[in-house]
Image (cartoon, rainbow, N blue to C red):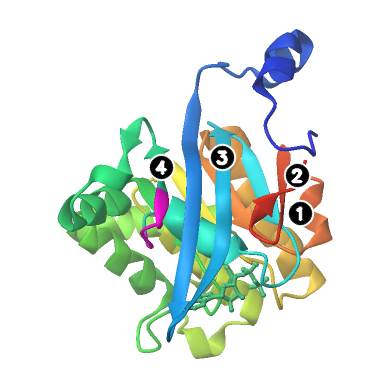
Amino acid sequence: MITSNLNWTNLAKSKSLMAERNHDPKSIAIWACGIQMIYQSGRQNFQVLKGIDLQVRSGDIQLLMGPSGSGKTTLLSILAGLLTPTAGRVMLLDQNITQMSRQQLAQFRLRNIGFIFQGFNLFPALTAAENVEVALNIKGIRGRRARHEAEIRLDQVGLAAQKHLRPRDLSGGQKQRVAIARALAGNPKLIMADEPTAALDSTSGHAVIDVLRKLAKEDGATVLMVTHDPRIIDVADRILHLEDGQIQH
Ligand SMILES: Nc1ncnc2c1ncn2[C@@H]1O[C@H](COP(=O)(O)OP(=O)(O)OP(=O)(O)O)[C@@H](O)[C@H]1O
C-alpha cells in the first residue's frame, strides 16, 4: 500500500508493483488540478480547499482521510461533479467535467458514477430489488433486463435472499448494501463513497468493505472514498491525507 499522495515518478520506477497489480501506468481515472473552494458566509469568505492536485489510477481504491472539517466531503463532491469549484479543473475518464454544461454533467454522472453516501436514501415503500430497479430505470434499463440486473447486483452484495424485503425489515448494514447494489446498477466505472461504513457494526462493515474491494479488484472500478474507518486502510491502494484544505505530504 502507498500512503503518500501520488508520486508518479517513483511509482513508474516501481516495476514490480506495476506487474503485481497489472496496472497500465497511463490509466488515470480521476485527475484534478489546482482545486480551490471558497464558501461565502455573509460578507465573509472561507477557503476550504487551497489548491488540490490529485490523480487516481483506474482500478484503485483511494481513500480521502483527515480531520473533521478538513474539506474531504467538499473535495469528493467536486470530484464527483456535484459541486463546482471556485478554481481548478477535474478530468474524469479523460473528460473535462469542469467544462460540461449542467445537462452534460448530469448525463455523465448517470452513466459513469455510482454514489454511496450516508443515510442510504432508499425508497421505504419499495423492496430491495425495486430500489435497485428504479436506479436502472433512470439509466434507461427497464423491464425484465432491469429485474435481472437488480438480482445480480443484490447477489453481488450478498442480499439475494432479502430481495423482496422493504428497508424497514433490513438491518443498517443490509440497507447500506442495498445502497451499494443501487450504486453499482449499470456498472459505473467510478464509485464515489462518503463514509460508507460509518455506523455499521463489524460484520456489516466488513461485508461492505469486501464488496468495494471486489468491485475494484475484480471488476476494475475505481473507488474514491471519504472515510475515518481504519478497517478500510487494509484494502486501500492509496491514502490521501487532507488537512486544513491541503494535501499533507
Ligand atoms: N455549503 C457550505 N457553506 C459554507 N461552509 C461550508 C459548506 N459546506 C461545508 N462548509 C464548511 O467547510 C469546511 C469543510 O467541510 P467538509 O464537510 O468538506 O469537511 P469534512 O472534512 O468532510 O468534515 P467531516 O469529516 O466532519 O465530514 C467545514 O468547516 C464546513 O463547515
Tell me the mark number nearer the camera, choosing from 4 and 2. Answer: 4
Most foreground residue, 151 or 133: 133
Q: Residues within 10 Å of mark 1 (few under 14, many from 20)?
A: many
Contact, CB < 8 Å: mark 3 with mark 2? Answer: no
Q: Residues within 10 Å of mark 2 (few under 14, many from 20)?
A: some
| Label 1 SS | helix
Residue 135: % across, % down? 31, 64
**Amino acid under label 1?**
Ile
**Label 4's element?**
strand
Q: Disc 3 designates what residue? A: 53
Question: Magenta segment, which residues?
Answer: 82-87
Which of discs 4 and 1 lies nearer the camera? The answer is 4
> What whole-number distance in Å separates the C-alpha atoms at marks 3 and 2?
23 Å
Which amino acid, by three-letter code, is at mark 4? Val
Answer with the quarter of the image where residue 85 lies: bottom left
Query: Which mark identifies residue 232?
Result: 1
| Mark pair 1, 3: CA separation | 23 Å
Q: Is residue 155 visible?
A: no
> In this orientation, which residue lies closer to the viewer: 249 or 65?
249
Image spot of residue 6 (x, y percent): 67, 32
Distance, label 4 to label 1, CA atoms, is 25 Å
- Quadrant where ligand 1 appears: bottom right
The amino acid type, in three-letter code, at marker 3 is Asp
Which circle's residue, 4 or 3, is located before the other in the chain?
3
Label 1 residue near ligand 1, CB within 8 Å? no
Q: Where does residue 1 sit, x and y in percent of width and height?
A: 80, 34
**Label 3 CB-ligand 1 distance < 8 A:** no
Q: Mark 1 or mark 3: which is in front?
A: 3
Nearest to the eye among marks 3 and 2: give it.
Answer: 3
In the picture, the disc for residue 90 is: 4
Q: Which residue is mark 2?
A: 235
**Left of 237 or right of it: where is 167?**
left
